[in-house]
Image (tube, coloured by chain):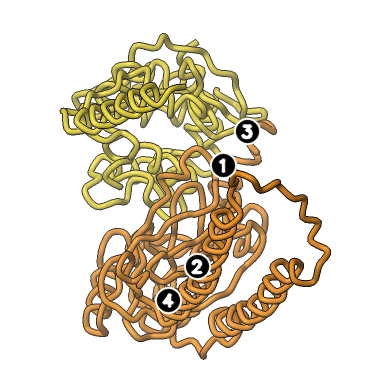
Amino acid sequence: MSHVGIALTAVALACGLLGAGCARGEARTIPTGAQLYAACESCHGADGQGKVELAAPKLAGLPAWYLTRQLQRFRDGTRGKHPDDERGLRMRAMARQMMSDAEVEAVVGHVAAMPDVEVVSTLPEPDPGVGKTDFAACAVCHGEQGEGNESIMAPRIAGLNDWYLASQIRKYRTGIRGGAEGDDVGATMQEMANKAVAPERIDNLAAYIQRLAE
Amino acid sequence: MISWLLPQASTFAPLIDNLVLFIAVIVGFWLVVAEVVLFGFIFKYRARDGIRGQYVSGEDKSQKKWVSYPHYAVVVFDIVIIAAALYVWNEVKVAAPPGEEQIRIIAQQWSWTFVHAGPDGTLDTPDDIRTVDDMYVQRDRVYTFELHARDVVHSFSVPAFRLKQDAIPGRVIHGWFTPTREGTFDIQCVEMCGIGHGLMAGRIHIGSAAQFAAWMTELTTTAVAANTITTSTPDRYAAPSANSVLVVGPQSGPSRASRWLVPDVAAHDHASAAGGMR
């Protein structure tokens, strides 16, 4: 390459770097929901189906208002900041990848648009029949079919992973979830989880709730 | 000189900085000398009209010395550097002063949990205080720490302390530090630990004795501390059995006397997910 060629290449590179530097000063473009979801995909799956081996529940089929609320709670530490919430602590860090409310909205829009998927049962020999009895207390807020009620912040629970439902009930019972300052709904859930179901019947209840979607 | 870029906030930070500087000066000096000699020779023996190029085998003593003397110098300076490094290693890793307070650091994907000993200065007592991602210490107080990892290998790093220590699952690693400067400094994980590794940041808050006491009082009364449920050691070390863990009652009184055993949520989940969990 001639000296002139080298000089021109150097000038072109310098201009490119200068341009890149100026571009950083412009308003940051919000990534699309699909782009943001790439961070979630490795655990929750491309279709939001969840991965039991990573303790990541399914997201497909959950309403946007609930997803938004939970992401915000993970971000501000209202959920997933208890020292014993090993999985919550993992999710808390990932939720903080969403840098703004706009990014939360974008990724939630992407997830909420995912068609619901059926999940397989994982709890050994559950008895959903027993769970039906205990579900009566849950149905007051979450609905007869577990369809949820946004007006009282009760999410849809029908069709969620049985292992996830069982673990969340246990977390509420032991105070690992729902005890953070300002978590009024969590406090209610703690009370309900302690009153509505005996520890040995939690798996049955979770199995029943999962099958409500069938 | 390094402290111009990064504050020194522990007793051994100056030692480590001085060691790095010492090595940099030695290596830097000889780098300059070597380059001067190299370019001097290139200039001296540059191509000139009427002089044929020579093949120099380097067998003459006068030629060999340009290689052998630097080799001797490398050995001598290596010994000096190793001696200095061993001195610093001994000061930082071996000759730990008696600890005035204990702290437990638990790493997991992708958070830090800190167990502060509370007013009695001893871990595993009812006044322990646990925090997530925020660590509180008192200036000029000697802390001994034990480092745990819940899942994979992590590395606990406080750049302002010049402290870096791997955390390995199944092992309890001990260390110490003495904060010397008040302020808030970064805690980082410096071992790739999964997709959220870059998000695994914490903060260490260093305060005066009065400030530290105020922090501890505040933490004891906040909801975070009020929800301190289980024992302050990671489950796998502390659980009395595979499926149970010691639980402290929800603030049942100053003594927190009401302890009972409940199924460990995590252990139960792992066992009940039809073999799919870990």
- The residue singled out by tag 1 in the image is A200
Mark 1 Cα within 10 Å, few/some/many (few <14, many 20+)? few
Residue B261 shows up from this direction: yes
Left or right: B246 in relation to B119: right
Chain A colour as displayed: yellow
User: To which chain does the residue with label 1 belong?
Assistant: A
Chain B colour as displayed: orange
Q: Are marks 3 and 1 on the same chain?
A: no
Q: Quadrant of residue A192?
A: top left
Helix, strand or loop under label 2? helix
Kindly indicate whether the residue at mark 1 contacts the one at mark 3 (C-beta within 8 angstroms). Answer: no
Kindly indicate whether the residue at mark 3 contacts the one at mark 2 (C-beta within 8 angstroms). Answer: no
Q: The residue under label 2 is which amino acid type?
A: Gly
Kindly indicate whether the residue at mark 1 contacts the one at mark 2 (C-beta within 8 angstroms). Answer: no
Helix, strand or loop under label 4? helix
Q: Which mark, by number, is residue B28?
A: 2
Helix, strand or loop under label 3? loop
Q: Quadrant of the C terminus of chain B?
A: top right
Left or right: B81 in relation to A9: right
- The residue singled out by tag 3 in the image is B273
Question: In percent of the image, x 50 and y 67: which residue is there?
Answer: B28
Residue at the bottom extreme of this rendering? B98
User: To which chain does the residue with label 2 belong?
Assistant: B
Distance of mark 2 from mark 1, alpha carbons? 69 Å
Q: Are marks 1 and 4 on the same chain?
A: no
User: To which chain does the residue with label 4 belong?
Assistant: B
Nearer the observer: mark 1 or 4; the answer is: 4
- The residue singled out by tag 4 in the image is B13
**Where residue A193 sits in the image (x, y, percent)?**
40, 41
Question: In percent of the image, x 39 and y 43: which residue is there?
Answer: A93
Q: Reading the chain from its start, which is encountered first: label 3 or label 4? A: 4
Q: Nearer the viewer, residue B94 or B245?
A: B94
